Image (cartoon, rainbow, N blue to C red):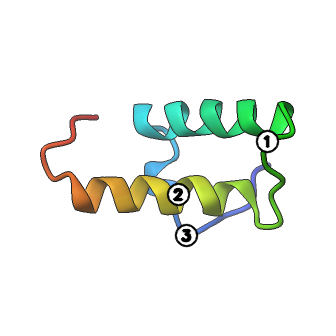
Amino acid sequence: MKSKHAYTELENTQLWKVIEDSLNDLIENQDIALTTRKENVIGYICKNLKSNFKSFKE
């Protein structure tokens, strides 16, 4: 079972999937290393994009 995080309402969106795939590529290529839970990083980016681009479509 997945643990809860602050961004669960965004987790099943297309935006989440695109950011998760991109982040996974960066991690796999060793371009970045995360020290924070991946869900928190993805959620923060989703929330920030949605709040700054009001016309963004899901």
Query: In the image, which is nearer the foreground, mark 1 or mark 2?
Result: 1
Per the rendering, the mark at residue 43 is 2
Q: Amino acid at mark 3?
A: Ala
Residue 13 appears at what percent x and percent y? 42, 37
Task: Identify the residue position indicated by label 3 in the image.
Answer: 6
How far from the left and from the top, in percent, is residue 57?
21, 35
**Quadrant the C terminus occupies:** top left
Tell me which amino acid carries mark 2: Gly
Which residue: 15% across, 53% down? Answer: 54
Distance from label 3 to label 2 (Cα)? 8 Å
Give the distance between the C-alpha atoms of the residues marked 1 and 3, in whole angstroms.
26 Å
Q: Where residue 17 is drawn, which disc sits there?
A: none
**Residue at 24% across / 60% down in the picture?**
52
The relative height of residue 56 versus residue 48 in the rendered view (above or below) is above
**Which mark lies nearer to you, 3 or 2?**
2
C-alpha separation, residue under disc 1 versus residue under disc 2: 20 Å
Is there a contact, CB below 8 Å, between mark 3 and mark 2? yes
The three-letter code of the residue at mark 1 reads: Asp
Residue at image x 21%, y 41%? 56
Residue at left 54%, top 39%? Answer: 19
Q: At numbered mark 3, what does the secondary structure look like: helix, strand or loop?
A: loop
Which of pointers 1 and 2 lies earlier in the amino acid sequence?
1
User: For the residue labelled by badge 2, is the local secondary structure a helix, a strand or a loop?
Assistant: helix
> Which residue occupies the foreground of this view, 37 or 28?
28
Residue 31, numbered label:
1
